[in-house]
Structure formats: structure tokens, C-alpha cells
Image (tube, rainbow, N blue to C red):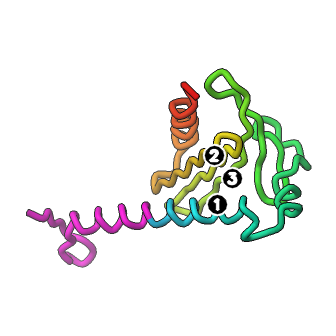
Amino acid sequence: MSKYSNGENNNMINEEMVDKIKTNIHNYFNELLYSWNNALFTGKVISEESLKKMIGKYADSGEEGYYGYGIFTSDVKLGEKMRKKIYHGGGIPGFFASNSIFPTEDVQIIMITNVVSEAFAHKISKVEEIIFKDI
């Protein structure tokens, strides 16, 4: 049985349907970024030469690593190994995303949230630790 609540102007809101829509948007967004990453790193978006420039180490960003042409690159210790991480995050009011690629391991970590807080960065780190614990 669906659960309803009062929305704006006392309009009834089907909360079950809202949850399904949010889940579908989340899944679509993750699939879209996954497909984009694959196209970017296989030469379907830009040339290999341009990709090397994009992920190059041009500007030292301190703890963030280095900034290339539009993306961060860093070497991070995960699972007792140093790993190359290529990533970027960002958002707008009410939405935040993180897109990380570990090319050597062929791993992508794509996370989105509608709860923007510093805790999100900690959650990204925890997911990385779990994934790379044994590999």
C-alpha cells in the first residue's frame, strides 16, 4: 500500500513513487557517468594526446594532488598500495557528485547525494578503503 503525505497547497504526494523516481534518477546518473568515463578513456571523446594533457600534473593542489586541464590526479595509498586516482567532484544547491577513476585497476567510483555536507567526502574515502582493502 502506498504511503501518502501532504505536499505544497495540500496536494497529496505518493512517497513510494517519489522514492522510485529518485532511485531511477540516481541509477541513470551513475550509468551516464560510467559510460562517459569509458568513452573518455578509450579515445571516443578526445584523443589520447589530449587525455594525457587533461590528466597531467600542471598545478599542485596540495592534498588534492595535481590539477590538469579540468580534472584532478593524485597518487593515494589504498589497500597497502599506491594507486593513481583521477577524479573530480562538484555540485549545485541540493546536489553533489564525485567521479573517481582508478585506471590501473579498472575501477570507477561514482557517488551522488542530495545531502551536501563534509560527511560526503568521508563516505567517499570509506568506500575507496573498502574496495581496495584486498586488491
**Amino acid residing under circle 3:** His
Q: Secondary structure at mark 3?
A: strand
The answer for how far apart the CA atoms under marks 2 and 1 are is 10 Å
Q: Position of residue 70 (x, y in %)?
A: 79, 59
Which residue is outermost to the top? 80
Q: Secondary structure at mark 1?
A: helix
Which residue is outermost to the left? 1
Tell whether position 21 is magenta: yes
The reply, left or right, for residue 41 in relation to residue 107 is right
Q: Nearer the viewer, mark 3 or mark 1?
A: 1
* Magenta-highlighted residues: 1-27
Which residue is outermost to the right? 58
Picture quadrant where residue 37 is located = bottom right
* Earlier-in-chain disc, 2 versus 3: 3
Q: Which residue is mark 1?
A: 38
Where is the C terminus found, in terms of image quarters? top right
The reply, left or right, for residue 88 in relation to residue 114 is right
Identified at 63% across, 65% down, the residue is 36
Q: Is residue 96 above or below residue 21?
A: above
Q: Nearer the viewer, mark 2 or mark 3?
A: 2
Picture quadrant where residue 96 is located = bottom right
Identified at 91% across, 49% down, the residue is 58
Query: What label does residue 88 carry, if any?
Result: 3
Q: Which residue is mark 2?
A: 106
Q: Residues within 10 Å of mark 3 (few under 14, many from 20)?
A: some
The reply, left or right, for residue 104 in relation to residue 68 is left
